[in-house]
Amino acid sequence: MKVCGAHLTYCTNIHRGETWSETRAALERFLPQVKQEVAPAEPMGVGLRLSAIASEELKYPAELQRFADFLKDNGLYVFTINGFPYGSFHGTRVKENVYQPDWRTPERLAYTNRLADILVRLLPEDPTLEGSISTVPGTFRPIGFEPEAVPKIVENMLRHAAHLVALREQTGRTITLAIEPEPMCFLETTDEAITFIEKHLLSKKAIARFSELTGFVPAEAEAAIRRHIGVCYDVCHAAVEFEDAAAGFERLANAGLRAAKVQLSAALRVPEVNERTATLLQRFDDGVYLHQVVELRRDGSLERYLDLDQAFAALDRAQGSEWRVHCHVPIFMDSLPELDTTQSFLREVLALHYSSPLTTHLEIETYTFDVLPEELRAMDVATAISREIAWAKNLLEP
């Protein structure tokens, strides 16, 4: 489903599924329902999420062909994969485990290479359609950050980019690794992601290393890195960090870097923190996901809290400040009972895209649906997904 120069879909990490059989069952149940609601007469893209276990099971040709047949028979196509969560993502304590293994490890590299191998075989026949894989922004800062971490991250990302080069040479299809900044991670903001790519992945040393990996001359190596490594701009994360959307995309463009994917998402917003709003927020402390909090103080400075419990502990000091909470809420909700969302920031991003397309991949991501307070789950998940897609599509169509 194309709208305003981009393929629009939702991320299937909203559905439970650790093994491939569990994931396939969820996809076969929900994808046709959503398509019937939002794109009954045209093909609909899919933002696929595969755990490491599921990717190991799907990589075999017979199973991959079976899934490809399902997609074709139902007017569906995969163009992007969410390669951020490696392991269990529902029904258990996820929190900081979602970042592990990170880009310091061979396990993350092998997993992401495997996702690329799957994606290149699932991309539809249209040769102009490129693929993307969103991923962890290096590592999770609070677990500790040894001096040799950055060289390890750079080496593994370059090795993955070299794998993408090889796939392109074999198939003619282009896939981009999309680094997704997130609060409290090694790369928290769009600016930090840009700086990291420029300083570490596009340094003379990195380009020389990539030339070794690919056989390219330096100019070709730099062009290939820029083609195969970009940024995933998660609107929820950027809003939580109080980013300036227009400035962030302008800096990406000026740096010659790709917004390989924009994830359409909204966060919780507390315009003025007090005891009442803190009490209301406790309903979102689900024990499953990490809900980082960024506080805008009255003096204009920012304070970060790893999770809601730390923010609650600082309540006396935070009174009167604004909190933005990394908790994805349905994007069609502009407010909640006595709380707000960052939907206005999402509207700003969509307006920027409408004016001049920011990316070719738009993916709605509201994976928290199962743990939201009950009153926010009055509708079934397929209806909620369909409403989100319809809401975004309405803002992007003339």
Image (cartoon, grey):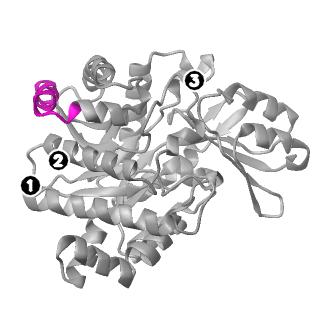
Q: Nearer the viewer, residue 228 or 21?
A: 21
Hey, what amino acid is under mark 1? Thr
> How many residues crowd around disc 2 within 10 Å: few (fewer than 14), some, or many (20 or more)?
many
Give, as a single range, the part of the protein colored magenta: 58-74
Residue on which the image places disc 1: 171
Q: Which quadrant of the figure has residue 316? A: top right
Crowd around label 3: few <14 · some 14–19 · many ≥20 (10 Å):
some
Q: Nearer the viewer, residue 266 or 207?
A: 207
Secondary structure under badge 3? helix
x, y percent for residue 396: 36, 47
Taking the magenta stretch, the answer to whether it contains residue 61 is yes
At mark 2, the secondary structure is helix
Of residues 1 and 278, the one nearer the viewer is 278
Residue that carries the numbered disc 3 in the rendered image: 371
Examine the structure image and report whether residue 373 is included in the region drawn in magenta. no
**Which residue is tagged 2?**
120
Task: Count residues near mark 1 (Cα–Cα under 10 Å), then give few for <14, some for 14-19, many for 20+.
Answer: few
Give the amino acid at mark 2: Val
**Judging from the image, what secondary structure is the residue with disc 1 in?**
helix
- Tell me the residue at 87%/46% (across/down): 319
Q: Amino acid at mark 3?
A: Val
Alpha carbon distance from label 1 to label 2: 8 Å
**CB under 8 Å between callouts 1 and 2?**
yes
Horizontal relation, residue 397 to residue 78: left or right: right
Counting residues from the start of the chain, the first of labels 1 and 2 encountered is 2
Q: CA distance from mark 1 to mark 3?
A: 41 Å
